[in-house]
Image (cartoon, rainbow, N blue to C red):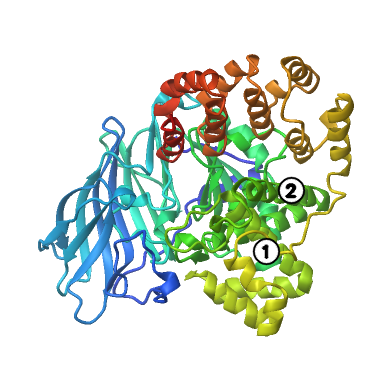
Amino acid sequence: MRRLLPLASILLATSACTTTDVAVAPDARDPVMIAPILTSADALDTSTYAQPQVARVTHVALDLDLDFERKRVAGSALLDVQAAPGADEIVLDTKKLTVIAVSDGAGTPLVWNMGQTDGERGAPLTIAIGDARRISITYAASDADALQWLSPEQTAGGKHPFLFSQGQAILNRTWIPTQDSPGIRQTWEARITAPKPLDVVMSGIAQAEPEDLGDGRRAFRFVMDKPVAPYLIAIAAGDIDFAAIGPRTGVWAEPATLERARYEVADTEAMVEAAERLYGPYRWGRYDMIVLPPAFPYGGMENPVMTFLTPTFIAGDRSLTGLVAHELAHSWSGNLVTNAVWGDGWLNEGVTSYFENRIVEEIYGEKRAKQEVALDYMAIIETLEEVGYEAPGTALHQPDGTDSAGSAIVYNKGAAFLRTLEREYGRERFDAWLRQWFDRHAFQPATSLMIYEDLKTNLAGSEAEAERIKLRDWIYAPGLPSNVAKPDPVAFAEIDAASADYAGAGSIPGGWRDWTSAERQRFLQTLPQARTAAELARLDEALGLSTTGNNEELFLWLELALANRYAPAVSQAEAFLARVGRAKFVRPLFQTLWDQGDWGREIARRIYGETRSSYHAVTRSGVDRIMAKD
C-alpha cells in the first residue's frame, strides 16, 4: 500500500528512493556521536530515575510487533550502555511496562528489579549489569499513554485501524524501556512488524522497502544515526500514502486526506531553504511530514525527519502553515539543541517560535509575520493579566516544582525575548549569534544558564551590557521586562478600527473575506465578550463563522458563543469536539462550558461521555482535571 502521489514525473523517481535513504546504524564497537551529560545543578532532571553519570544509554535497538487487536506492542529493546569505572547497575525509566526477561548481549540473564510506581514518573527498572555493556529487555506495552490506537471508524478512510505515538514530555517510557530524559541523547534503530496492508513510518530514515514476512505481516526498518532526546522517538502506522513536495521533502497522509495535505504544505521545500539561509544547514537528511487523524493531541510534533501534524491546520488557503514553519524550525532549536530539563522548555519552544516567524516572513512576507507577532504578544498580555505579572510561572526558566503559566510564556515570551535582542543589536549581529549557538551546541543538551552565559559573552559582550538589556530578568524573573520589543501598532490598525466600530455601532466589517486569517482571529479576539443571542446570530450569518473551514477561527467563534450560552452553538461544538482531539481546542471549550455553571456542565458531561475514549491521554488528562472541579 505504499502508493506514491508525485508532484511531477521528475519527482516520482526521487521520492520513491529518498524516502528510504540509507543510514548506518551506530555500533557499540565503533566511535559514535555521544552527547555530554550535563552535571550542573540546573541540569538535574527530576522527571527521570536515571543516573546517567553512573551508567547511561547511548543507543536503542527496537524489535517490536504491532498488535492492533490487543492494542499492544511487544518485543525487545537492545540497549548500548556507557558506564563509569566500577559501575555495576543501570537505572531505566518505565511506566506500565510488562518486563518479561533481561539479559546481556550474549543472552546471559541479568538480575533486575522493578521499583515502586511514583505517579507520572512511573517505576524505575534497575538492572545489575556487571561488565555488560549491552542489555536486551524483552517486554510488552499494552496500556501505553504515548500510544493511541484508533479504530477504523476513527480514521478518514474508515477501513483500517491506525496507531500513532506522542512521547513528549515523558510518555515514551510507556512503550520503550530507556532513560527517558531530554538530556540523555541516544541514537536508535528499529524493526517494526505490522499487519498488511498498513504502512509504518518513524522519526528515523526508512531502510529500503518493507520485508514481506509471508504471514500477512511486513517488517519495516528505520535508523536514526544522530543522537536525539528519547521523547523524539516516534511511530505511526495506518493506511497512508506519500506525496513528494521537493527533493528532500514530502508528506504522508490517509488517501482521503493526502491531496488536501499536499496542497497545504506545498511551501515546505522553500521553507527548508529559507531556514538554511538564516541559521545554517539542515542536518537531518530528509524533512517529511505525516498528517495524522484528528485525534492527535497537538498542532504538531517535531519528530526528526518525520514531523507529525494535526489535520486541523488544513484550511485550504495555507493560512495556518506557520505550524509547518514552527515544526521545521525545531530541527535546529529543540532537536539539534535540546533543553536538558523540562523547566527550560523555552529553549526549545521560545527559540523555535522566533525562528518560525522569521521563516514566515521569508515565505509569506513582512505583513503576515508582523500580524502573527502581534497575536502572540496579545496572548502574553492576556496570560499575565490572568495569572498576575509577578506569578512565578511567568518566568522563562522554571525551577524544579514550579509550573509554567502556559504556552504564552514558554513559546511567546521566549520569542519576544529574542525579538528584543534582535532589535537591540540588529538582525545581522543577532543572526550571527544564534547561528553560532546552534553550531556550538549541535546534538547536545543545554540549559538556561548556558544560554545566559553565551548571550552575555558572545552577544552582549560584558556584564554591564547584560544588565542594561535585562538579560537575567528576561530568563529568570516573572512578568515582562520593560524593554520588550512591542509589536508594530500598524499591523492590526485596520482590524482594531473595525472591532471598535462593531463595539460602538454594531457595524459588521464588509471586507471580512478579504482579510488574512490573522486579521480575522484578531477581530474575533477583540470583540466585546458579552453578546446577546441576536447579536451572535447576526455575526454568524454575516461572517459565516460556524461554517468556516479554518479551525482556528471556528474555535474562537465557538468559545465566544458558548461563553454567552448561545444555544445554536451547542450542536456545532458537539460536532467539533467529536472530530477534533487537539488539546489546544478541546480543553478550552470544555473549560468554557464548565464555567457556565449547571447549563454548561450538563452539556460538557454529556459530550465528554461520548468523546473521551477518542482522545489521546494528553488531551484526556487536561479535560479530566476540568471535570473534577465540582
Q: Quadrant of the C terminus?
A: top left
Which residue is at 76% across, 56% downward? 362
- What percent of the width, then of the height, locates residue 122? 28, 51
Query: Image quarter for residue 150?
Result: top left
Instruction: Kindly indicate the quadrant of the structure image that contains residue 613.
Output: top left
- In the rendered image, residue 417, in percent from the top left (x then y), is placed at 67, 63
Say if residue 522 shows up in the picture. yes
Q: Earlier in the sequence, mark 1 or mark 2?
A: 2
Which quarter of the rendering shows the N terminus?
top left
Going by the image, does 224 lie left or right of 582?
A: left
Q: Secondary structure at mark 2?
A: helix
Q: Which residue is mark 1?
A: 417
Residue to which mark 2 is pinned? 372
Q: Quadrant of residue 200?
A: top left
Q: CA distance from mark 1 to mark 2?
A: 16 Å
The answer to which of 374 and 513 lies nearer the viewer is: 374
Judged from the image, the secondary structure of the residue bearing numbered disc 1 is helix
Judged left or right of residue 378, residue 604 is left
Which residue is drawn at the image coordinates 50% and 64% (left, top)?
338
Q: Name the residue type under label 1.
A: Phe
What residue type is disc 2 on? Answer: Glu
Image spot of residue 409 (x, y percent): 60, 54
The answer to whether residue 272 is seen in the rendering is: no
* Above or below: residue 84 compared with residue 56: below
